[in-house]
Amino acid sequence: MTSATGRAHAAGEASTSAGTTEVHGPRTPGRPTRLPRSARRRQLLAAAQDVFVAQGYHAAAMDDIAERAGVSKPVLYQHFPGKLELYLALLDTHCDAIVEKVRAAMAATTDNKERVRGAVRAYFDFVDHESEAFRLVFESDLRNEPAVRERVDRVERLCIEALTATIMADTGVSRARAELLAAGLTGAAETAAQFWLAGGRQVPKDEAEQLLAALNWRGIASFPLQGEAASGEASGRGEAGEASGKGQPGSGEASS
């Protein structure tokens, strides 16, 4: 005959009602932990991130994630039908984070030198975060999966677009040329930030950002602002006209 305790345990470690998940800790006496569904989801994502970052997608198991979160597998599957869906939910979160960092850097100032510095800082901050979530975006071992590839490509495209609009507005170059410049800047920032981290942060972070920003700025700064380019052309035409007029008949400069 099944005891009352056994029946209670067999009834399930988790139940949901009115959007709230109830979890019975397997070894914790007393009342069960109750969390709103959104809070439980965040908890599970945090646990999954730890496991995926440490083990990679292929080596990670749903058992590991459930154990890390302190819940049963049924609770985990109530929120995510499988490991891929869990991974994609994490990827969406962190892909959005780096895109927003780059966009914020562009919107924070009208000083183009500071914009370049801000874009570089966005990548260094993302890579240097203690969660190491950047590995899910930049070092995923699941890039052959179409859904993952699409998200990683989207991050690259949106970050390039954020810089492209600024470069076009300020320099007057064509979209194709602005996209090429933006791709060079974002690619350099991503690669340098990862190299800096893998090398053990031998250069202080602030100095590393300044070095890379200076390198990028020297290239971008060679393209004049649209207004400056127009005034420069007008000035050049004026100076040329003045020069050609000197010593010419009717110029008022008579020779004796």
Image (tube, grey):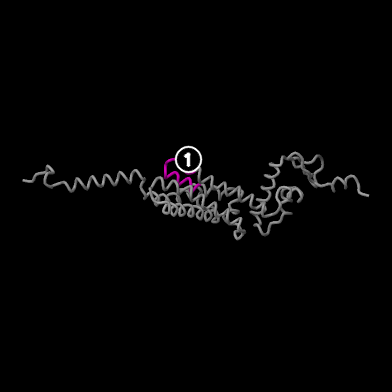
- Looking at the image, residue 149 sits to the left or right of residue 80; the answer is left
- Looking at the image, residue 169 sits to the left or right of residue 15; the answer is left
Q: What element does badge 1 sit on?
A: loop
Residue 37: give x, y in percent of width and height: 71, 42
Dividing the picture into quarters, in which one does residue 114 lie?
top left
Between 98 and 131, the one lying in front of the other is 98
Q: Residue furthest right?
A: 1
Q: How many marks?
A: 1
| Residue displayed at 67% across by 59% down | 58
- Vertical arrangement, residue 4 with respect to residue 55, above or below: above
Residue 171: give x, y in percent of width and height: 38, 47
| Residue displayed at 19% across by 47% down | 243
The magenta region covers 105-121
| Residue displayed at 15% across by 46% down | 246
Q: Amino acid at mark 1?
A: Ala
| Residue displayed at 33% across by 46% down | 229
Residue 53: give x, y in percent of width and height: 64, 54
- Is the residue marked by circle 1 packed among few (<14), some (14-19), or many (20+) residues within 10 Å? few
Between 22 and 153, the one lying in front of the other is 153
Q: Residue furthest left?
A: 256
Task: Tell me if residue 114 is in the magenta stretch.
Answer: yes
Residue marked by disc 1: 108
Between 166 and 197, the one lying in front of the other is 166
Dividing the picture into quarters, in which one does residue 147 lie?
bottom right
Task: Tell me if residue 177 is in the magenta stretch.
Answer: no
- Vertical arrangement, residue 201 with respect to residue 227, above or below: below
Residue 178: give x, y in percent of width and height: 42, 51
- Looking at the image, residue 256 sits to the left or right of residue 194; the answer is left
Q: Main secondary structure of the magenta part?
A: helix
